[in-house]
Image (cartoon, rainbow, N blue to C red):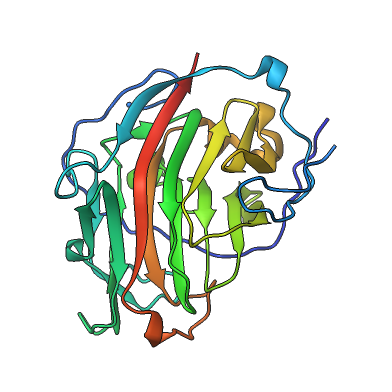
Amino acid sequence: MVILVTVLIMRRRFYHFIASAGVVLSLAFFGVSCKKSNINSNTGTKTTPVTPPDTTKAPTYTLVWSDEFNGTSVDTANWTFEKGSLGVNNEKEYYQAANATVANGNLVITAKNESVGGFPYTSARMNTINKVNVTYGKIEARIKLPMGAGLWPAFWMLGTDINSGVSWPSCGEIDIMEHVNADSLIYGTMHWSAGGHEADYGLNLSSSPSEYHIYSVVWDANSINWYVDNTVYVTANIANDINSTDAFHKPFFIILNLAVAGDFPGQTVDLSKLPASMYVDYVRVYKAN
């Protein structure tokens, strides 16, 4: 039996949600209310040794939702913008829709050195709550990340019941991809509540964040697996709600954002790197056949 080990990452992500009306995409797999590998073939860097998935039993997947960002602006049928300061993680950005644009087939989230609302920087954060909610499947995005001290881009998910009175971390959080500052590490992490206390589990992988990579999780009733391209570097056991992981059997929604400063990257910001942009080629959701 695999035992899920908690590690102390302790990055609180209290969530501030601005409600908006929307049609929920319902997918049944979801609750949608829609050996050792030493070398990463894409980057040439060493990876964390993990037990590879049993590909002889791996399911096939069907695409059930995507945003390819082929238009001229963010599709608000898919995304809701979060606005202002969310008062979390000692971050220093003010979120506004103007910092998220669509061009050349990419969503571009840009952090700028400009003062708005009493905060020294602006950026954008957007989510799919009440529009695309996911339980199980494969969730992926192809992203190119900015590099610089104080930058904190993320592609992640929160449990939808945070909008119905369930507080963080009891709602559950799946960080599909986080990166900070100018180093090479990509972080995959989960947060939840166990015995009334925050529990965390995750690992990191050395990559080349300034180049495009596919960041994904493959999630079913037994486990969550984190990938950079085709390299799995974290596996978490959630079978039978082991270690109070019941939150990870409920619907989640998707979030994209680029924070500036905070508890994870620190408070030093390299102003010479601003404006800095996170490029998202697509976000896709698949269900297992």
Left or right: 257 in relation to 242: left
Q: Position of residue 197 (x, y in %)?
A: 63, 56
Left or right: 98 in relation to 48: left
Q: Which residue appears at 48% of the width and 57% of the height?
A: 211
Front one among 72 and 253:
72
Residue 26 found in image quarter: top left
Left or right: 259 in relation to 206: left
Q: Which residue appears at 74% of the width and 48% of the height?
A: 39
Q: Is the residue 173 above or below the residue 206 in the image?
A: above
Front one among 111 and 267:
111
Residue 92 found in image quarter: bottom left
Q: Quadrant of the N terminus?
A: top right
Q: Position of residue 57 (x, y in %)?
A: 68, 16
Q: Which residue appears at 68% of the width and 28% of the height?
A: 239
Q: Residue furthest top?
A: 289
Q: Is the residue 119 above or below the residue 175 in the image?
A: below
Left or right: 9 in relation to 31: right
Q: Is the residue 93 above or below the residue 195 in the image?
A: below
Q: Position of residue 153 (x, y in %)?
A: 44, 62
Front one among 232 and 13:
232
Q: Position of residue 36 (x, y in %)?
A: 82, 41
Number of numbered discs on residues: 0
Q: Is the residue 105 above or below the residue 27 in the image?
A: below
Can residue 278 be seen here? The reply is yes
Can residue 33 be seen here? The reply is no
